[in-house]
Amino acid sequence: MSSFPSGPVKQVVGRTLVIRGEDIDTDRIIPARFLKCVSFDALGDQVFADDRRECKGEHPFDQERFQGASILVVNGNFGCGSSREHAPQALMRWGIRAVVGVSFAEIFHGNCLALGIPCATAPAAEVESIQQRVMEAPHLSWSLDLELERLTSEDQQWGIAVDEGPRQMLLNGRWDATSQLLAHGSEIQKLMQGLPYIDGFSNS
């Protein structure tokens, strides 16, 4: 599995897998019984746990041909339901670094952005065409380019869209709160020194 995103996210490259269906909610992505975990570390193994059990090894997240994929292609209203951040955490820890679909639930989209995972959209007919191409040739490498707003395989390409605000945050790294704090460490220290309530004393 590749390292987690950090800093600017301009492009996601890798193989692709498909989850078909409308209104796939966060309880399907990561069932509620896994929300009591102390950390997110083990959630990758449990992504789509109930669906995978029912499919008995035939679920896309279990099929050998899709192992190591980093781009997920879905349909409409993906990530609806509860606001649990565990859903994109589980996808990321399995290895997903970008999601392409017709539409996304707003809170799921925001939770993905907070992890540096682009949620790109395309019309339903184009998404179906992308999904069909992935199923025909799962070995192909794909590139999701946020600057060009384009999804490209080795032999085809499609236009995709990322909302401009999130796109700019991904491109310049402002989505990454931790890196932003570390990059401005000296400024934060200076500000803290001027606060009267730090360490319980007053500078006034």
Image: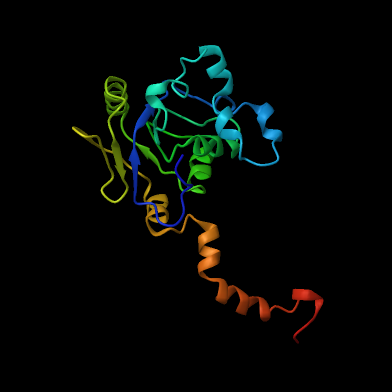
Q: Quadrant of residue 20?
A: top left
Could you tell me residue 138's position as x and y percent?
Answer: 31, 25
In the rendered view, would you say 140 is above or below 135? Answer: below
Whether residue 75 is visible to the viewer of this picture, yes or no, is no
In the rendered view, would you say 95 is above or below 199? Answer: above
Its colouring scheme is: rainbow
Whether residue 1 is visible to the viewer of this picture, yes or no, is yes
Q: Can you name the residue that lies furthest to the right here? A: 200
- Please state if 21 lies on the left or on the right of 51 as rendered: left
Could you tell me residue 9's position as x and y percent?
Answer: 39, 52
In the rendered view, would you say 161 is above or below 31? Answer: below
**In percent of the image, x 41 and y 33: which residue is there?**
68
**In percent of the image, x 55 and y 59: which residue is there?**
178
Could you tell me residue 194's position as x and y percent?
Answer: 67, 81
The residue closer to the viewer here, 203 or 117, is 117
Q: Quadrant of the C terminus?
A: bottom right
Q: Quadrant of residue 120?
A: top left
**In percent of the image, x 62 and y 40: which residue is there?**
40
How many numbered marks have been drawn onto this rendered protein structure? Answer: 0
Could you tell me residue 202's position as x and y percent?
Answer: 78, 82
- Please state if 10 lies on the left or on the right of 42 as rendered: left
Q: Quadrant of residue 72?
A: top left
Q: Can you name the residue that lies furthest to the left here? A: 155
The residue closer to the viewer here, 65 or 91, is 65
